Amino acid sequence: MCGRYSLISDLTALQLRFDFENPVHEYAPRFNIAPTQNVLTVRWEDGHNVAEHMRWGLIPSWAKDMSIGNRAINARAETLADRPMFRTALRRRRCLILADGFYEWTGSGKARQPMRILMTTGEPFAFAGLWETWKNPDREMINSCTIVTTTPNDIMRPIHDRMPVILPPEHEAAWLDHSIEDSTALSSFLTPYPPDMMETYPVSTLVNSQANDTPDVIIRAV
């Protein structure tokens, strides 16, 4: 599962890294991104990468109301092709969800310890995402997304039994490519990220509240 993450990288650096040129309005560093909030994504449109804020929590086009998205912040890689909520998006509406770290909790009860997981280089990366468009009762179009998860790698296994799919840079263009619709081919991208390229460290319980969206959240806990 992935229920919190960060994106504090400079916008210019993100534009260069993920090859989008369109303006991104109201971008600000985020230390503690939570479900139902707007998140920065990249999708393929008219031959170009396009950056766009989407609501985190996928709302299928057939939903009666948007609350269903609150339960769809993650999608299991193993069942994407079978679930009606995700299978069309898998074929036709894939995106990158930009991040530079995420959080997971280990332990139980009051002893639960939040951990921050990131690249050893500290560089931004892309979660494999799916997106959909939903029309609310006022006829407003709302784009929403979900993060695909997979089995954990060696660095994540002691912390949690799932991890978000992090796409290697060389797979990002193929993930966005509309011409690829075969679920078997797409599944080949949905594997655990190499653990030797990742690191983790404990952070304070400030991250437990989404109201805490400050640099203090990412400081290593003593």
Image (tube, helix red, strand yellow):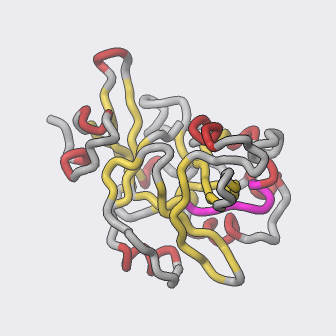
Spot occupied by residue 129 in the image (x, y as percentages of width and height) = 61, 55
Q: Quadrant of the C terminus?
A: top left
Q: Residue sitting at 50 percent across and 46 percent down?
A: 36
Is residue 73 or residue 173 the one in the foreground?
73
Q: Is 79 left, or right, of 41 in this rendering?
A: right
Task: Look at the picture and state if 118 lies above or below 52.
Answer: above
Q: Give the mark count.
A: 0
Is residue 61 or residue 204 the one in the foreground?
61
Spot occupied by residue 45 in the image (x, y as percentages of width and height) = 68, 77
Is residue 150 in sight in this rendering? no
Spot occupied by residue 182 in the image (x, y as percentages of width and height) = 85, 58
Name of the residue lying farthest toward the left: 222
Is residue 201 in sight in this rendering? yes
Q: Is 101 left, or right, of 42 in this rendering?
A: left
Q: Residue sitting at 54 percent across and 50 percent down?
A: 56
Q: Which residues are magenta?
A: 89-96
Is residue 72 or residue 159 the one in the foreground?
72
Q: Residue sitting at 47 percent across and 39 percent down?
A: 3
Name of the residue lying farthest toward the top: 109
Is residue 95 covered in magenta? Answer: yes
Q: Is 110 left, or right, of 170 in this rendering?
A: left
Q: Is 44 left, or right, of 194 in this rendering?
A: right
Task: Look at the picture and state if 1 lies above or below 143.
Answer: above
Q: Residue sitting at 54 percent across and 64 percent down?
A: 41
